[in-house]
Amino acid sequence: MADIVEQDTQDQIEDTQKGKFLTFCMGSEFYGIEIKYVTEIIGLQPITEIPEMPIYIKGIINLRGKIIPVMDVRLRFKKPFREYNDRTCIVVIDIREVSIGLIVDSVSEVISIPDEEIVAPPNMAKEGNKYIKGIGKVGSDVKLLLDSDKLLNETDLENMSDL
Amino acid sequence: MKKLLIVDDAAFMRLTIRTMLQKYEIEVIGEAVNGAIGVEMYKQLHPDVVTMDITMPEMSGIEALKAIKAFDPQAKVIMVSAMGQEGMVKEAIISGAKTFIVKPFKEEFFYQTICKVIGI
Amino acid sequence: MSNRYVNEPMLDLFIFESMQLIEQMELLIISNEKSSSYASDAINEIFRIMHTIKGSSAMMLYNNISTLAHSIEDLFFVLREDKPQNVDYSELSDLVLEGLDFIKVEIVKIRNGDEADGDASELIKSLRVFHATIKGKDLCAKDQHVAEGAVSHEDYTPEKQQYYISKVRTDTTSLKNTFQATLRFEPDCGMENLRAFGIINELGDLAEEYYHIPEDLDHEDSARIISEQGFTLLLKTERSLEEIHRGLLQTSALKDLQLNQVENCDLFNDLLKERKISLEDSSARVPASCGRDRLANEHEDNEIHVTANQPSIINVSVAKLDQLMDLVGEMVIAEAMVTQNPDLKGLELNNFEKAARQLRKIASELQDTVMSVRMVPLAGTFQKMNRTLRDMCKKLNKEVRLQLIGQETEVDKNIIEHISDPLMHLIRNSIDHGIEMPEEREARGKTRLGTITLEAKNAGGDVLIIIRDDGEGFNKDRILAKAREKGLIRVPEDEITDKEIYNLVFLPGFSTNEAVTEFSGRGVGMDVVVKNIEAVGGTIATDSVSGKGTTITLKIPLTLAIIDGMNIKVGDARYTIPTTAIKESFRPKMTEVIVDPDDNEMMMVRGQCFPILRLHDIYHIQTDVTHFTDGIIIMVEQDNKTLCIFADELIGQQQVVVKALPTYIRDTKKVRGLAGCTLLGDGSISLILDVAGLIGFRQ
């Protein structure tokens, strides 16, 4: 019985987080990621490299005793690498028990984007588009909404063969 | 708070009984894993009531019952039985068991039985 | 799920205790079935075990298990009481083992949170038939009825269902009171006839004369009758209504009591007359011996053995132990973070150092103790193999005995779970393909009875489990041919040693058997074994002598959680090498370094040549230390292979908590040479090196 109640509460929490996105910036573009996956945002930390990983996996960090891998989103999207500075953040996301930190240029704000304002992504050949779930309109701005699942799970075959 | 001694060789039964009595004003002051230890514990702990399993190694429930009654004729012992043990239950009654309870039993019924026996 | 009174601890204990009892019983059966009859101690114990399981499962409302246990209990009751001759013990064992298997399956379902919905009715029928056959000549019609599974509800009509009231009123000659009481018991309270008996038993001082309906409380239908119609008591007493009322209310499981004073005591006299007549008439006297659990028998086992040194044992949930282990791990890290804190660097802190040493000592002891709590002897797992052996032998008509050595050897609880299946598979393999048929063995001059030895012993930080059989050994040529066929051979064939050939069987997708036997399966079986062993950080190896037998050795680390490690530095990166693998470390001299024509660097140590592995090279780390004489060599060894690891410098030795690399990393790629990671005192992460993997770099 208790389980059912718990699940309901969990669903409720998720519902209130629905439609809310954490936006961050990469170069001139703004991206959004569903807030329900975001567990925390931290500043840059010393990263321990792991050999033989794809280039966008920078390594692992120590987050209060828990060891979490970090991914450079720029490199994941095959954009040019930018040196980290004090605005660089790590957005820690947690999907189905897998945690990962996304290294982004800077973090912007949390905004609500109603479903009506989200359209499907255009079918462009540009790299990184397979990770876009939709395009959200906020006023005159446009946010590229990320598919967190794909971000985590797509094995980039090209990168693998480099190793 | 009334004191109860559990005598049963099955850890599961001991836990079940203890769990059932948690919310009542009955304190489980001891658990004996066979009849012989049960008799010793009775002598040392003087519980108000005893739940006694019938089938146990080392010393059966009937033997332990007799020994306890010999030590304390006023002892209140409830036999815990399973179906098919009519003969032994009868002997237990003759030997001075206050009453008996048959597995499976529910918590409420169990509690009522104990209440009747110790008069609360 | 509805009416089940259950909570987690009770369920866990039910599962735990029942499984324990089942395993005990299984052993008893296996060891007894070979003789012409079961030892009476064994019969008693099996009876008690089934009785206990019957009770517990009934309490948990798992009626299918309870009913099955009841049937087996009945069977062993007959064996105990009647001591019948000519019992087919082989069939009995098969039946009972089948019953145990059923219960095991149900309990596994329960453990997994599924419904225990198994149907044992076929098996119960077979048990009843067997029960009937061993009861043999003593079979009375009633028992036969029972054997066929029909519930006997003979209609027992007591001599008098009603009273009849005498029409003639006669004066009472005594001053005694006559009361009539009708008692009804709670439905399903069980043994209503004995509850009634209990009332009668205590009536002694309350009533001078009494009569009750039903009259015969020993009759098997009396309980049902009382349950349906109530228990009627008629008594003559000096006591008052209130006293009788109070007395009868003491009855347990009493649902309803009706008590009236009866004026007409003629009634009583009439009924007494009736009773006398019916007593003389007794035809429906059911023999008491058909009743179960005869009183006499309890007196047999009368000796009081109070076992003096009963070990104090307490059951702890594994989850709590895991939690404890995690906490201890974190404490080890925290201790390092305090005592090796960068803030303290360079300071002279004598008192602090002393206190820190004390802390380290206590932490170390705590850690050892917690780890030992989690250690469980292999005995349980080894004993399970008896059943596997027995079943295999029966099915294949082979004769093999199992010899167990070193069962008391302990391993971490987590590991136990991963060992059971691989061991079972290996033993099945041994019997299926290793041990020859008895006739063949005799023809080869071997003993008819084959032997499989299962041995466990400690070796440094590992536990060795050795499975040895005296069968026909591996067929070297067949293995080589199969490996060649599957393209599994990496080295020129003339350079492979026999031992290496035998170890080819562990490669995935390998099997020399075309026919997939029911037991051994295709190569799927062996490489699952390897996976399971590797999952606990262990290794597997084999050796064989044609015609003599095969030996398979499993090497499993005692614990994976906390190890003694040597931290090293390569550039900005930190690595940790398990100290158990380190032989020595030194600063190399150029004179000791050799480079072969293929540019492989090697180290000369006391006349022997070992390959050098440059960590910065294989892991592409930036470091200024590339010249041998600037850095340090750490010589490591695993599985008789030695490697010289070149690093910048040694940082220090410490106990490290092994943490697995994050799932995401592991899923992306399994990096050779990395076993996990750990947190150092200053909060930085050190990667733990897997020596066996590193050795693979230079092969």
Image (cartoon, coloured by chain):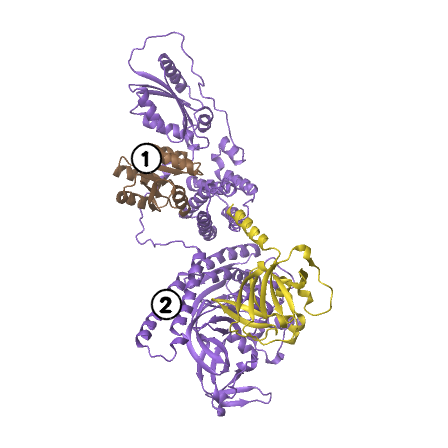
Give the percent coordinates (x, y) of residue C115: 55, 46
Of the residues shown, which amino acid type is indicated by label 1?
Answer: Ile
**A12 sits to left or right of C578:** right
Q: Which chain is brown?
A: B
Q: Residue furthest front?
A: A140
Establish if A153 lies above or below C601.
above
Q: Of A27 and C99, which appears nearest the observer?
A: A27
Q: Nearer the viewer, mark 2 or mark 1?
A: 2
Of the residues shown, which amino acid type is indicated by label 2?
Answer: Ala
Q: Which residue is mark 2?
A: C363
Give the percent coordinates (x, y) of residue C697: 56, 79
Q: Which chain is purple?
A: C
Q: Which chain is yellow?
A: A
Is residue B59 in view? no
Is residue C490 in view? yes
Q: Which residue is mark 1?
A: B118
